[in-house]
């Protein structure tokens, strides 16, 4: 298995992701500059966090125009795992690969802390091995994480099991008290219909080794690797 970690001007979590794949999981991953036009030979894609194009205009609004995004779209259409983390989630929304949009956090402040999230489905490329109801403690760090989507689309996300994680308490209660950014329905992660494309606001790469204060994020990368190269499931 060979994984591409896309690098935009302003990405800052690409090396963390590469480290987790190559040194922690022993799976080959390489950085791919956003101006490249081919992802031939790659079995999965991670769009990492950061501040692509300095977050000008809207987070992800300029990165979506990068040449590599056509290839990300192509790989997504073959059922390969495509996971966007934080700024990567914003880029997937702006690209139309996932429905909805990000607003500024309700507090209008950048929020950087650890939160608990409840896994809502195990049919996504990021949560494949994780039973529904699993609680993960993961870091968040963003200014635009207040996920929103139209009423009909929200219903369709719910009906099709596309809500992947919600912000929760450490015992899985979901409510406003556990919502760090105002996100609709406490949504922290969603997938496309087939589950192979996932966007998540938390940063699993910052919680995949004990030295970083927790290992809950590793299961997400293991799930991603486990999705493999078999195409649509
Ligand atoms: N950690 C990140 O990826 C930051 C995402 C984005 N730049 C924001 O502040 O919302």
Image: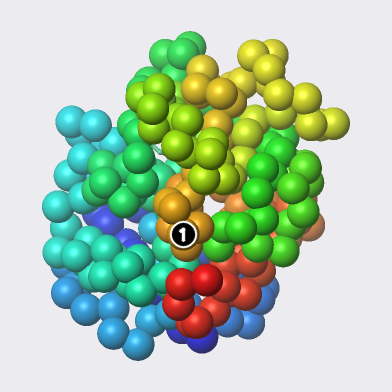
What residue is rendered at 64% in x and 14% in y?
176
Q: Is residue 16 visible?
A: no
Rendering coords of residue 31 (x, y %): 37, 72
Q: Which residue lies furthest to the right in this view?
A: 171
Ligand 1's quadrant: top left
Q: Does the residue labelled 1 lie within 8 Å of ligand 1?
A: no
Depth check, front residue: 93 or 192: 192
Measuring from the top left, give residue 182's x and y in whole percent: 51, 18
Residue 88 in sight in this render? yes
Residue at horizontal 55%, vertical 62%? 125
Q: Give the quadrant of residue 187.
A: top right
As rendered, which of 13 and 178 lies closer to the eye?
Answer: 178
In this picture, residue 7 sits left or right of residue 232? left
Which residue is labeled 1 in the image? 194
Relative image position of residue 81 (x, y in whole percent): 46, 67
Q: Is residue 69 above or below residue 203?
A: below
């Amino acid at each position: 298995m060979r994984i591409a970690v896309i690098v935009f001007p302003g990405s800052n979590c690409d090396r963390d992701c590469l480290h987790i794949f190559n040194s922690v999981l022993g799976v080959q991953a390489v950085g791919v500059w956003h101006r490249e036009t081919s992802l031939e030979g790659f079995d999965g894609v991670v769009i990492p966090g950061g501040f692509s194009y300095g977050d000008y205009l809207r987070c992800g609004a300029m990165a979506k125009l990068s040449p590599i995004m056509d290839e990300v779209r192509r790989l997504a259409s073959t059922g390969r795992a495509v996971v966007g983390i934080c700024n990567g989630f914003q880029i997937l929304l702006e690209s139309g690969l996932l429905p909805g949009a990000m607003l500024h956090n309700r507090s209008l402040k950048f929020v950087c802390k650890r939160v608990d999230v409840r896994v809502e489905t195990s049919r996504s490329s990021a949560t494949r091995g994780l039973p529904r109801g699993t609680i993960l403690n993961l870091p968040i760090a963003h200014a635009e994480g207040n996920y929103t989507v139209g009423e009909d689309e929200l219903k369709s996300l719910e009906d099709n099991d596309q809500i992947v994680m919600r912000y929760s308490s450490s015992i899985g209660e979901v409510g406003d008290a556990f919502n760090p950014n105002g996100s609709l329905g406490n949504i922290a992660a969603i997938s496309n219909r087939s589950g192979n494309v996932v966007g998540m606001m938390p940063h699993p790469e910052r919680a995949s080794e004990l030295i970083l204060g927790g290992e809950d994020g590793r299961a997400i990368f293991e799930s991603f690797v486990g999705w493999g190269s078999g195409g649509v499931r």
